[in-house]
Structure formats: C-alpha cells, structure tokens
Amino acid sequence: MSVLEKIRRYEDFNYEKFFNELSDEDIIRSINKESLNEIDLLTLLSPRAEKFLEVMAQKSNSITKKHFGNTILLYTPIYIANHCVNKCAYCSFNIENDIKRRKLNLDEIDREGKAVSEKGFKHIILLTGEDPVTTPVEYIKDAVKVLKKYFTSITIEIYPLKEDEYKYLVENGVDSLTVYQEVYNKEKYKKVHLKGPKRNYEFRLNSPESGCKAGMRSVNIGALLGLYNWREEAFMTGVHGKYLQDKYPYVDVSFSFPRIRPHAGVFNDLVDVSDKNIVQAILAFRLMFRSSHINISTRESKEFRENLLPLGVTKMSASSSTEVGSHIDENSASTAQFEISDDRDEIEVKKDLLERGYQPIFKDWIDF
C-alpha cells in the first residue's frame, strides 16, 4: 500500500461520529496501551480526551525521560535563498508578493556557516524557497559541501525532489530531510496552493518516502496548523508517520507542529489553534511515537516552549531567523518567511534549559 492509498482510506471518514461515540473508558484504554495504533492516536486527539491531558502529560513525561533523558537537541536554520515559483496563500515567499529576494553565493554561505558554527551548533537546517531554476540541486549540493566543514548534520528543507536527486545530495553530505505537507486535506490544499509545482499534492506527499529510499538518516514531517481542522491534520500526520516508520524502520521519523505565523501578504482563511490544542497533539504523538523526536520551533513563544519541555519535546531551534543571510548581516537585504516569536540566542536558550534541569546538546550522533 502506498502512502496515498493510506491517506485515501480516511478521505470519507466521519470524524464527528467517531468522536461522539467515544467514552471515557476508550480514552483511558488508549492512554494505558503500550503500543498504540492509528485509532488510538485519533482517540487521544479527540475533544473528549481533553479532560485527560494531565494523565497523558504524566505518561508522556515518563516515556520521554526513558528514551531521551533530560536532553534537548538544539539546532538553527540557515536560509540561503528566498526565491520561489509557487503562489501559496500563507507564505511571504509567494511569487506574487513584492518582497526583497536574495540568494547567497558560496562565499556568503561559507561565512554564514562559520558564524553559526562559532555559536556551537552542529545541527542546521538549510532552507530555500521553492525555485529549482534559481536554486537548482547543483547549487544545493555546492552549499552543502561548503557547510560540511562546519556541521556534522545538515537537514534540507527545500522543494521536493525525486529519489535520485535526494540520493545525490545524501552522497554529498545531506543526512536529514524536512518536508511539511502543509495541509493533508486535498480540497484545502488546492485552495491555498494557487500556482506552481507545489500544487502537485501527490508528489509532495511522496517526497518524505523518496528521502527514506535515498538513504536519509532522519525525515521530519508535519502539517502547518491553522489551515484546516487541527485534529484531522494532526491525525493524518500520524498516519503518514506510522506508514514511514513501518516501511523504513531504520529511518528516524520525527514530527513538528508548526503553527501559522504573521507573514508578508494577506491571508485570513485561518482555523484557530490554541496552545491547549498544541499540547494535546504533542502528548498524543509522544504516547504513540515513543522514541521519535518531537520538535518545537521559534514560531512559538519562549514561555510556551518552556512549558512544553516536560510534555515530550526533544528538539528546539535557537538563534533563529527566517531571513536570508541574517547570521552574517543583521540587516539582511531580504524579507523573512514569517515572523518568529522566540528571539532568544543560543546562549539564552542554553541557560534557560540548564536552569530547568535539562541538558542542551548540539550533537546527538557520532560519526564512525
């Protein structure tokens, strides 16, 4: 069964009927299970499960400590270009937005990498807009070869590629991949992706699997919460993740819960996602995906991110910016992809983690 076939199984699923028929006993049963299936995950994402969040939190904390101790992996994003050919309603990089565009040359990428490495980071995410002509795979490869001088782990978050292209980048130093489906509901997907190759729902959906086949060590997925019903989107993220874990057990499948932030352009067709909703999603995922990393980025505030620490989060960004070249130029001549909420640098984040009893780490695996 392909991932598309897996997703299609739930296209006509009656979520409201399922939620209405749940009992407290169903919730407790799913919480207490040692190995959860997809229906257990949906049970824990239900409105009825909200009154059991404290119980879920206690178990989530125990599971996280068992698998990760008190460690939190720190990373930072490096934007090397913001050119994009897509018209996505929710993103500053939208091709029709009148923004400042920029693409770093290899010397600038080197200086950007050096500046970030001097802060102690060993894990980075390399980001571009989605423009295969302006930032072709060869450009990404050249950037990675420059940055490998400074970092032990390079994740790419660029436009979706074919398996052989991912393999080419793996051979040249990329070890991890982030691809957000953005929204799993196909009708909503069409409404927010108005123009460009990103309109191809199926190709994007298949991209994480292409990365697994190509030899990626880690693949990170998620939905952009705020575009559609968060319970359904979180559930479909879980269905996608379970498919990848079952088929590629040697790949570290991890999860993020990005919530939409202010950006250039106007887009008001949003669905409210509260802090409590994010908490419930993280708890449900930790109970099902016990050894998977769960990431929370600087889209969220300092206070909220710190409150999430005991609930299952194992990865956090720090010293973040969504502007191109901002690590070497604080007044970067480019427009940010979105506004961040937590603007602490790595020193502040490390200090705050230590004060809360957590061990910040900059590298979570060993080269052999």
Image (cartoon, helix red, strand yellow):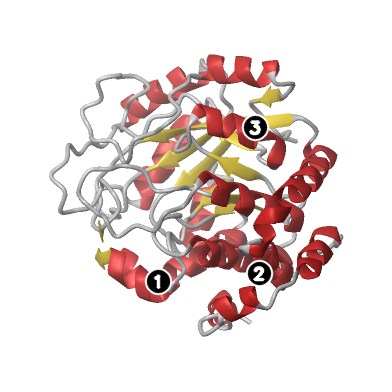
Residue 354 in the figure: left or right of residue 142: right
Q: Do the residues labelled 3 and 2 touch (CB within 8 Å)?
A: no
> First in sequence: mark 3 or mark 1?
3
The relative height of residue 173 versus residue 245 in the rendered view (above or below) is above
Residue for point 47% across, 68% down: 184
- Disc 2 residue type? Tyr
Residue for point 55% across, 41% down: 173
The relative height of residue 110 versus residue 221 in the rendered view (above or below) is above
**Residue 88 occupies which quadrant of the picture?**
bottom left
Q: Which residue is denoted by mark 3 in the rendering?
A: 73
Q: What element carries label 2?
A: helix
The crowding category of the residue bearing disc 2, from other C-alpha atoms within 10 Å (few below 14, some 14 to 19, many at least 20), is: some
The relative height of residue 324 versus residue 44 in the rendered view (above or below) is above
Task: Determine the CA span between mark 2 and mark 1.
Answer: 17 Å
- Give residue 349's position: percent from left, percent from top: 57, 20
Q: What element carries label 3?
A: strand
Please give the count of numbered marks on the rendered protein.
Answer: 3
> First in sequence: mark 3 or mark 2?
3
Q: Which residue is denoted by mark 1 in the rendering?
A: 201
Q: Which residue is denoted by mark 2 in the rendering?
A: 243
Q: Do the residues labelled 3 and 1 touch (CB within 8 Å)?
A: no
Residue for point 36% across, 76% down: 187
- Disc 1 residue type? Tyr
- Disc 3 residue type? Leu
